[in-house]
Amino acid sequence: MKPILELSNVSKRYPGFSLDKVSFSLEPGYIMGFIGPNGAGKTTTIKLIMNLIRRDQGEIRVFGLDSLQHEQEIKQRIGFVYDEGHFYENLTAAEMTRLIAPIYRHWDWDFYEKYTRLFDLPARKKLSAFSRGMKMKYALAVALSHRAELLIMDEPTSGLDPVVRSEFLDILRDVIQDERCSVLLSSHITSDLDQIADYVTLIDGGRIVFSKSKEELLEEYVLIKGERSLLDSGLRDHIVGLKESQFGFEGLITAKEEVQRLAEGRAVFARPNLEEIMLHCIRGKAQ
Amino acid sequence: MISLLYKELLVQKRVLGMAFLYIFVFSFAMKNLGEQLPLAIITAVSYMFVLYGGAWDEKASSDRLWNSLPVPKWKIVGAKYLSVLVYVAGVAVLTWAVFAVLSMVGMGGISTPVRLEHAAGAAISGRREQHLPARLLRPGLHEIEDVQFADDARNLFAPLAFVGSFG
């Protein structure tokens, strides 16, 4: 199947920061988590996809179309949710929607009504009186009401409290199952993605560290704990990221069989979560 | 395009009351301008609308919104310029109404009628003052042509309007 979103060798240089040959792709119908520390290039990548900034080189194809040549066509089929509200705060939700609705060819008022009811959004309240969670839900309702095939979300959950965040994610998961659209969701809160992501792309310092399915990742990476003396037996070569303390070490490894042989039963293996994978991968690079 | 123009007007609805107030105050404060009074009022109040429009756009970082929506750049820019004409037309009508009421109740003693030249003069200076948020213009190719077009139009019409406003 043709990827719904495909970046190849996309670069963007700023003074002091550059996005270096970013490539990844997303198959239709899946949720991709886009993770990385603050300032890693997540938002820059998303801005490039949305044509908010111009790329220096590389190619971005959305729905198989070039993102510069078919900009309008592509944007008709994309829904977006950004980390901060970009709506006019002095308008009510209903007024804001009336501005946006006519722009989309496939805008569906029934959908919009359905989602505002589902999300409990007051139509007559000014957006400035909306809480952060409500603003995010409003942005999601708008993004979903024109039958978008691809949702692009830039840290929608940052700044939300845990209760609202998990509610937001539940809604997102339900909606995506119903509507069958694909999602690119950037976040630095990796537990969000533990729940809902099918694919995970890690970016750090403007470079893609990996872009894999979550199953692949959890199969490939194993967490190992043991005494420090164990490290000297050639184990170090297999370690992606390492945290040493007085009592022992914790590390992330890839080749499990090989390491198991080396450790000779003196280490404990555990299944890592995305946060541990992200931390070790980034720390490992720093070393 | 209509949606964009509608947005320009919708965010302004709270300024409308203030516009009335300004026109009223200016009619007295700048009375000694005589013939040019309507021109001054229309320019000043339209200018206020233009600034408010820009301020709301800046505050909401609406460049991210509009550039993410499927709206071609030239329409975003075009609506901004077009909105100036709408403000001027609106303010001209308001000024005319305020003058009419003032003379009806015998206040102010303004004898100058609001003429089309006044509005035209204000429109040109308003276009000159339309500060487009630079961020709205950043990416894409359309905007370069568009700004140039606006410049050409301005250069062509400005002298005409200057003469017209004294006619």
Image (tube, rainbow, N blue to C red):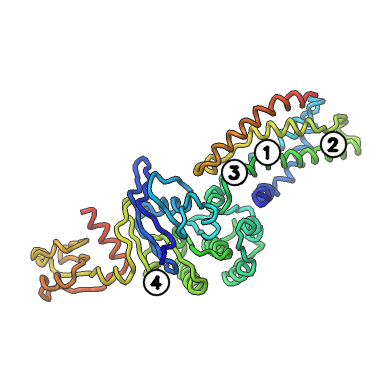
Secondary element under disc 4, as helix, strand or loop, is helix
Mark 4 neighbour class, 10 Å CA radius: few under 14, some 14 to 19, many 20 or more? few
Secondary element under disc 1, as helix, strand or loop, is helix
Q: Is there one chain holding both mark 3 and mark 1?
A: yes
Q: What's the residue type where badge 2 is placed?
A: Phe
Q: What's the residue type where badge 1 is placed?
A: Met
The total of numbered circles placed on residues is 4
Of A253 and A228, which appears nearest the observer?
A253
Instruction: Report the residue marked by disc 4.
Output: A195
Give residue A42's position: percent from left, percent from top. Answer: 39, 54
Of A268 and A145, which appears nearest the observer?
A145
Compared with residue B12, is residue A249 higher up or lower down, i.e. above or below?
Answer: below
Q: Is there one chain holding both mark 3 and mark 2?
A: yes
Label 2: chain letter:
B
Foreground mark, 3 or 2, reads 3
Q: Quadrant of residue A120?
A: bottom right
Instruction: Report the residue marked by disc 1.
Output: B48
Q: What's the residue type where badge 3 is placed?
A: Trp
Label 1: chain letter:
B
Foreground mark, 3 or 1, reads 3
Instruction: Report the residue marked by disc 2.
Output: B99
What is the distance, in whole Å, between disc 3 and disc 2 at their CAs?
37 Å
Q: Which mark is residue B74?
A: 3
| Left or right of B40 in this view: A250 | left
Mark 2 neighbour class, 10 Å CA radius: few under 14, some 14 to 19, many 20 or more? many
Q: What's the residue type where badge 4 is placed?
A: Gln
